[in-house]
Amino acid sequence: MAISVNGIPHQVMAPADWILTQSAPTYQQYRLPYERTNTLRLDNVLVVGAGSGSDVAIALSKGAKHVDAVDIDPRLVQIGVRRNPDRAYADPRVTVHINDGRAFLQSTEATYDLILFALPDSLALVNGASQIRLESFLFTDRALRTAYEHLKPSGVFAMYNAYRQPWLIDRLAETAAAAFGHRPCVDQTASHRAVITVAVDAANQKCAVPYAPPREVVAPATDDRPFLYYKGGAIPAMYLWALAGIMLITLLAIRLLGGSFRSMRPYFDLFFMGAAFLLLETKNIATFALLFGTTWLVNALVFACVLVIVLAAVETTRKFRTPPLPVVWWTIVASLAMAYVIDPAWLLSWPFWPRLLVACVVGFLPIYLANIAFAKRFAATEHAQSAFAINLLGSILGAASNMAPWSPATAIC
């Protein structure tokens, strides 16, 4: 049975015994993680990207005594519960977790004999205002190190997918090598499909061919820049044309509806405030995705907090006497400096509620103070239409630049 998401083929369900007996290169990825180790106990297995349950069923058929099945999409799991031919999710040895894979690894204290990243390839972004995909934080150097820390001394980690480009396979292999301290087994099958397997103990690996990386390998993705599929180098032309088109249309619309640019000149500071607001909002989405997972709840939490913070700033300005504007500017600078100094990675091991409290204070204090500054500045304007127009222009620029992988909003550490 084939499963499509938004009209795009995504997964195929078939009996585990049938998958394991197929000779086609496409199906080799399901067998190789179990063949690339000398000794592999399967007392406890973690499958990230469990989907409709085929990878879980294969682990059970290999003798797994317990499987933690993690997937971010509850609908895929529901389909697997009802229609997977092996009924893997009905097996008492399986525990299902609807969660982001990185968030699960950061929150669990369990250790595993085998951790599988089983085709975790999203078809969506975390948010339309950024280039962060649902699986972006799953393939950073720190994420693979976290997987290493959750393996038993004889444990094995494996990931497989159709990686599309040879340089991407090499990048992931070198990321695994950096996390585990030695080179992995790399099996390339069909159409740039690859299985990357690495054991905690190098002596426990059984590679068909020793992996030899090319002379130049793209550096591992990091939590600061989690763009696995961005090779770097020149700025793609499509981004430049898209950004130029957006800004041109915006300039024309604001000129026609907002008045002359000469009348907006006294309020140029509001232009930068508009751009900064959108950049900060997207930065918080990226930070919260790292701290709490790339689920819809993270987006909802960030947007709700932003709206509450804006309302709180307006009410603060309306009901209380606030400091002079220069003082507010300096408090904004101080709050931004605090957000820059505090690495979100420091909070990953904290319990949920303290982590949420600190993340909210660090992430939303600059927005709160900036909205107080905006309210005071806007109240003092003589031409509200011109002031709002140039603020809107800055917001459009900030939103457009968020779409680029070099955006400052995505540098979260």
Image (cartoon, rainbow, N blue to C red):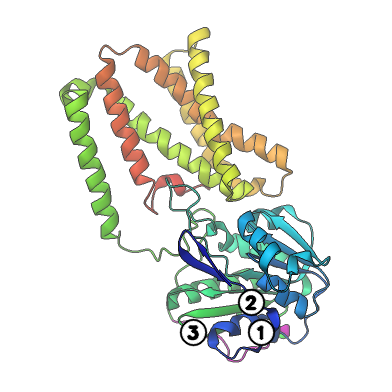
Q: Quadrant location of the N terminus? A: bottom right
The residue singled out by tag 2 in the image is: 14
Give the image location of residue 219, x and y in percent: 47, 67
Residue type highlighted by circle 2: Ala
User: Where, by quadrant of the figure, is residue 60 drawn?
Assistant: bottom right
Q: What stretch is highlighted in magenta?
A: 204-214
Name which residue lies at 64% across and 58% down. Answer: 101
Does the CB distance between marks 3 and 1 fall below 8 Å?
no
Residue 368 position (above or below residue 1):
above
In the displayed structure image, the side of residue 23 where residue 263 appears, left or right: left
Name which residue lies at 38% across and 53% down. Answer: 406
Secondary structure mostly taken by the magenta-highlighted segment of the chain: loop
Residue 48 position (above or below residue 379):
below
In the displayed structure image, the side of residue 361 where residue 226 appears, left or right: left
| In the image, residue 207 lies in the stretch drawn in magenta | yes
* Foreground tag (2 vs 3): 2
Does the CB distance between marks 2 and 3 fall below 8 Å?
no
| In the image, residue 35 lies in the stretch drawn in magenta | no
Q: Is mark 1 on a helix, strand or loop?
A: helix
The residue singled out by tag 1 in the image is: 18
Does the CB distance between marks 1 and 2 fall below 8 Å?
yes
The residue singled out by tag 3 in the image is: 190
User: Where, by quadrant of the figure, is residue 154 drawn?
Assistant: bottom right
Give the image location of residue 113, x and y in percent: 77, 73
Q: Around disc 3, counting alpha carbons within 10 Å, would you say few (fewer than 14), some (14 to 19), or many (20 or more)?
A: some
| Cα distance in 3D space between marks 2 and 3 | 19 Å
In the displayed structure image, the side of residue 257 where residue 130 appears, left or right: right
| Cα distance in 3D space between marks 3 and 1 | 19 Å
Residue type highlighted by circle 3: Ala
Q: Can residue 321 be seen in this view?
A: no
Q: Work out whether mark 3 precedes mark 1 in sequence or the reverse, and give the earlier one.
A: 1
